[in-house]
Image: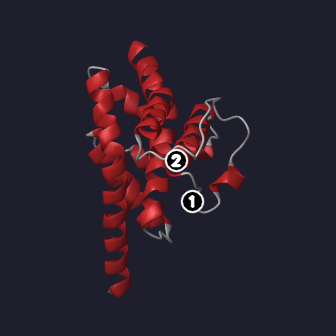
Amino acid sequence: MWPVLRALWTARRGRRAAVATISPLVARSRHRLDGIPDEAWFDPYIVGFMMMLITLTARRTVTISDSHTLGTVQAEAWTQITRMSANTIGEETLHLSAAEHQAFEAGCRNAIAFDLALYGTSVAGVTEAMPHSIDEVEFTADEPPHNAVGRERILALWQHYFESHIRVCGST
């Protein structure tokens, strides 16, 4: 019974951390873009970006040792952040990952780059897994997000990595 309770507690803490970090950015984008179309949340790039960012953010708070707990964190955080049902997001994520979908993989890489800019460090050695084809945006970890310059850099990266792709999804 204790392992099950520990997994539930871990999932809750990971989800809360991801939602607390990502939701304000998404809310800002919803306001700036006059909403986000529902279909944008299922765009392969956006799925990759959001799921990877949720994963990295949650793993900064808790140690997630099994795929079931990670899947729970991802689905529940995605639901809270996007306001969409999590019925098929797990299957969609697995499908895009297994198919090595290029836009999905680009979203994952850009989430890693955003996470590195946001925190200035990697989580669990993700920098070793980063290919060299991350979108070219200059950022440095010497501008922490807690000062005005750092916040502006983070918001500019968010606009580049997230909002620019939402605009493309909404225009098709």
Task: Give the image location of residue 87, x and y in percent.
Answer: 33, 46
Q: Is residue 45 above or below residue 33?
A: below
Residue at image coords 42%, 59%? 58
Disc 1: which residue: 123
Pointer 2 local density, CA inside 10 Å: few below 14, some 14–19, many at least 20: many
Q: Identify the mark nearer the N-term, 1 or 2.
A: 2
Image quadrant where one finds the N terminus? bottom left
Q: Say which element carries label 2.
A: helix
Q: Amino acid at mark 2?
A: Asp
Instruction: Tell me whether the residue at label 1 lies in contact with that at label 2, contact meaning CB atoms closer than 8 angstroms.
Output: yes
The answer to which image quadrant residue 124 occupies is bottom right
Residue at image coords 31%, 51%? 20
Disc 2: which residue: 115
Pointer 1 local density, CA inside 10 Å: few below 14, some 14–19, many at least 20: some
Task: Give the image location of residue 6, x and y in percent.
Answer: 35, 79
Task: Give the image location of residue 22, x and y in percent.
Answer: 36, 45
Name, please, the residue furthest toward the top. Answer: 171
Q: Amino acid at mark 1?
A: Val
Residue at image coords 40%, 38%? 148
The answer to which image quadrant residue 103 occupies is top right
Indicate left or right for 126 with 22 as reference.
right
Indicate left or right for 135 with 5 as reference.
right
Disc 1 and disc 2: Cα gap in Å? 9 Å
Q: Say which element carries label 1.
A: loop
